Image: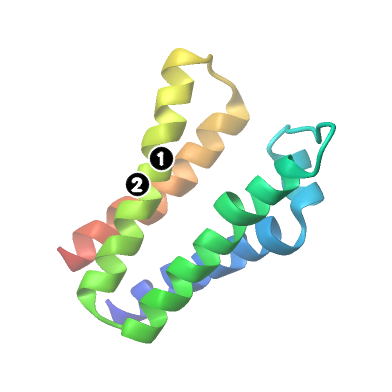
Amino acid sequence: MDIINIIFALLSIGLGLFGWLAPRYTMGALDLTAGATTMGMSEVRASAGALFVGMGIGALILGTSEAYLMLGFCWCGAAAGRLTSLVMDGQFRKKWVYFIVEAGVGIPAILLNI
């Protein structure tokens, strides 16, 4: 169980690094375009980047079941938002892939640590 929790935390950090340090790449992967200001890149760095890095690092530092459980809840929150988009905004393959990844990290992290 501990190794799986660490893998989930490292996955969070790894994916978050892309959003934080490579926002243009991340925006392209998410089909987002930059606007008249750099606010879009700022949002990607924060919400799709450093937030996930912080979650992963925090879980590793605390190393408790509760920390890894919270990591799972965060990933499931992202999956819930993605599922809402699938229902309300239309279905696309890429959305399903991201939903599966988010739920695939979140649900096991919750079940392992609850």
Q: Amino acid at mark 1?
A: Ala
Instruction: Please tell me which residue is depicted at 51% across the width and 61% down the height of the picture.
Output: 52
Instruction: Please tell me which residue is depicted at 32% across the width and 83% down the height of the picture.
Output: 62
| Image-quadrant location for residue 45 | bottom right
Q: Is residue 81 left or right of residue 16?
A: left
Q: Residues within 10 Å of mark 2 (few under 14, many from 20)?
A: many
* Residue at disc 2, secondary structure: helix
14 above or below 30?
below
| Image-quadrant location for residue 37 | top right
Instruction: Please tell me which residue is depicted at 32% across the width and 58% down the height of the picture.
Output: 72
Q: Is residue 78 left or right of residue 23?
A: left
Q: CA distance from mark 1 to mark 2?
A: 5 Å
Residue 100 at what x, y percent from top left? 45, 41
Residue 6 in view:
no
Q: Is residue 38 left or right of residue 93?
A: right
Q: Which residue is mark 2?
A: 76
Instruction: Please tell me which residue is depicted at 37% across the width and 80% down the height of the picture.
Output: 3
Residue 36 in view:
yes
Which numbered marker is on residue 79?
1
95 above or below 1?
above
Question: In which quadrant is the C terminus drawn?
Answer: bottom left
Tag 1 and tag 2, C-beta contact below 8 Å: yes
Q: Amino acid at mark 2?
A: Cys
24 above or below 93?
below
Which numbered marker is on residue 62?
none
